[in-house]
Amino acid sequence: MKFADVIVDIADSEVDKIFEYSFEGIAVRAGCRVVVPFGNQKIEGYVIEVKDSSAYPVERIKPILSVLDELPAITEEGLSLMRFMQKRYFAPAASVLRLFLPAEMRQGKIREQIARYYVLKEGDYAQMEASLRSTAVKQRAALAYLKENGRVRAPLLNEKFGREAILGLYGKGLIEVLSERENRSPYRDISSEDKPVRLTARQQEAVDGIENTEKTVALLHGVTGSGKTEVYLNLIQNAIARGKTAVFLVPEIALTPQMLRQLRARFGDSAAILHSGLSAGERYDEWWRLRRGEAKIAIGARSAVFAPLEHLGLIIIDEEHDGSYRSETSPRYSTFDIAKFRAEHCGAKLVLGSATPAVETYRRALRGEFFLAELPDRINRRPLPEIIIADMRQEIRRGNHTAFSSYLKEELETCLEKGNQAILFLNQRGYSKSVICTECGYVPKCEQCDVSLTYHIDENALKCHYCNARYKMLSACPNCGSTYLRHGGTGTQRIVMELQKMFPAAKILRMDRDTTQTKEGHYKILEQFSARKADILVGTQMIAKGHDFPSVTLVGILDADMSLHFSDYRSGERTFQLLTQVAGRSGRAEEKGKVVLQTYSPDNYVLGFATDYDYKGFYTHEIALRKATAFPPYTDIVRVLIQSEKEEEAIDVLKRLHRELNAFYLDNERDFRFFGYMKAPIKRIQKKYRYQILMRLNSGKREQIEAIYKISLPYKTKSVLVQVEENPNNLT
């Protein structure tokens, strides 16, 4: 008899206890999923260790009932990663292990898809045919069809010749059934011819430098259009040639099909795709292709960092600066942390790529922590597009109250006359940002969140962009009864409608969260635009990065100030990144591109650096500002967020937790730059009241951060959620 340490998978539970079970006569290995008795029920669990003995009396130990997988679902490396995440994020083991598997696999709702085929039995065909009555017309025809076509899918044969005729052939022993596993392959129609590309001297230098450096992490800093993707593909090719596997991460699901096309062109079926936009069956099959080693390359958004690949040789994080690489749900992990652990554990390389690296990343590269490879020029020395600033204050003074400056209108006309394409960027979906009563100033807000509702004209509805709640559009103000309601702010829907009036002959596409909700929504829109079936693409930040449209010669950036004045120390950095990335979509072929940047703050330093594509100048200014104001990377921000549907419970936990953390702060005051508690900027989201304790610690005080975790997390209850966030993406 042997024994196994098992972590049980209880839905919506934070149980973090190891239970011991016995087994005999069945193959149980570390990483296997098993069914075990737990109380009065049978539940799934994960084996994390197999042992020869137990400290408990054998009669008290319950047996494992069954093993769910022949091949352990979680690799040995995966178990090591689980332990790292437990320690790093103080996360329950079960919640970590859930990240490793497709949800449908855990729920037992999805199984392998088995395809059934009919084939002729071996033997003399003439004798088979002779054994049939002359009146058995359908059976004779089916037999002939199988002889001509070999194996045929069972549903097709039944449909062509009738189920009774086929069952008759089977009953006579003339045909047999074959069953085999069949993969549900996403994006089947994605294919591309691999066009051999000769690397430029700079690209080859980058590949050689990354391959030969002793450092685990490399930063590939290249301007938009400099050929970073081809560097990635060469690095993957080299890894595969060495018998290794690779993970390729992109920030947006919208970018995945594009990258998949390039990977399939180069590597065929060796590339598998992992992201939330797939069907449950597709996720299941793609995951198992990777786990069995049938696919060597995993591509996807953040969650693909957990791809079950063995012999890992390379991890690529494209657009590494993007905020989507930080998880906003528990456990709140950093993709970089996970990727770095995997790379170090496997002896692999981790490559971070961006035209606008995060300030912290670039600083670490300059300090020698990361290898730095730079691509300062576009391919074939094509010029970066000219950026023209349109001062919207002047436009208003001239009586122009539309969303389009006179300069942008002229450039759009010229672009369309030449038969080129244009992209217009506005990071606000819907028709208008809010609805306002002009009589009393009333603004409708979400009943579940402390935010104003956005008007969506196609549904004539008000929507909350935090919880997706939907409300009927108002016919009159509920506060004063006035029917004078004004739309405040502009969204992508409104822009499309105004464009249609200005250019009635133009074909316009819109790409935002509302138009990409279907399974292949992103892909279909991008395919249409790439095939030049549209003249103008209007979209939010999902169009800002990674896309390559040779016919786009004009980019319009509407409301470039939107993110500039957020109460966030990274607002300048994020604005610079967004503007640079969007601008980079223009002029990627032979014709020089142009960018029109509309702003109410033309003299802001961020816009000055952006118009010159001066990342290094921006970095020098920004890092000096961070140092002077003691913000990351010179400090670490820690937020303890307390949420509850009952405000009094949230406040009670806030007060008790603050007292304990305050005592810790007073004992370690020299390590802190700031300590305080307050309401969260958005007081309520999804019916939960939100309060926070904010701390700013001197950089590198890991032991203090761990102490904050240990003090805070025991306050978590079924009704009060307590989360510790390190350098959070936002403080809303």
Image (cartoon, helix red, strand yellow):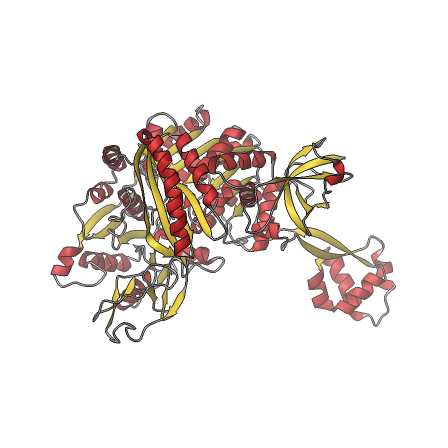
Q: Give the camera-side residue of 140 and 326.
A: 326
Q: Give the camera-side residue of 413 and 301.
A: 301
Residue at 40 percent of width and 66 percent of height = 470
Residue at 35 percent of width and 52 percent of height = 541
In the displayed structure, 671 sits above or below 252; it is above
Total tally of numbered discs in the picture? 0
Q: Is residue 531 visible?
A: no
Where residue 449 sits in the image (x, y, percent)?
Answer: 37, 59
- Describe residue 351's horizontal placement relative to residue 239 as left or right: left
Q: Quadrant of residue 505?
A: bottom left
Q: Give the camera-side residue of 502 and 673.
A: 673
Where residue 270 sits in the image (x, y, percent)?
Answer: 56, 42
Q: Quadrant of residue 364?
A: top left
Furthest residue toward left: 397
Residue at 25 percent of width and 58 percent of height = 412
Q: Give the camera-side residue of 381 and 491.
A: 491
Q: Is residue 255 visible?
A: yes
- Describe residue 69's horizontal placement relative to residue 225 as left or right: right
Where residue 18 sits in the image (x, y, percent)?
Answer: 62, 39
Where residue 670 sits in the image (x, y, percent)?
Answer: 31, 29
Residue at 48 percent of width and 57 percent of height = 520
In the displayed structure, 444 sits above or below 230; it is below
Quarter holding the N terminus? top right
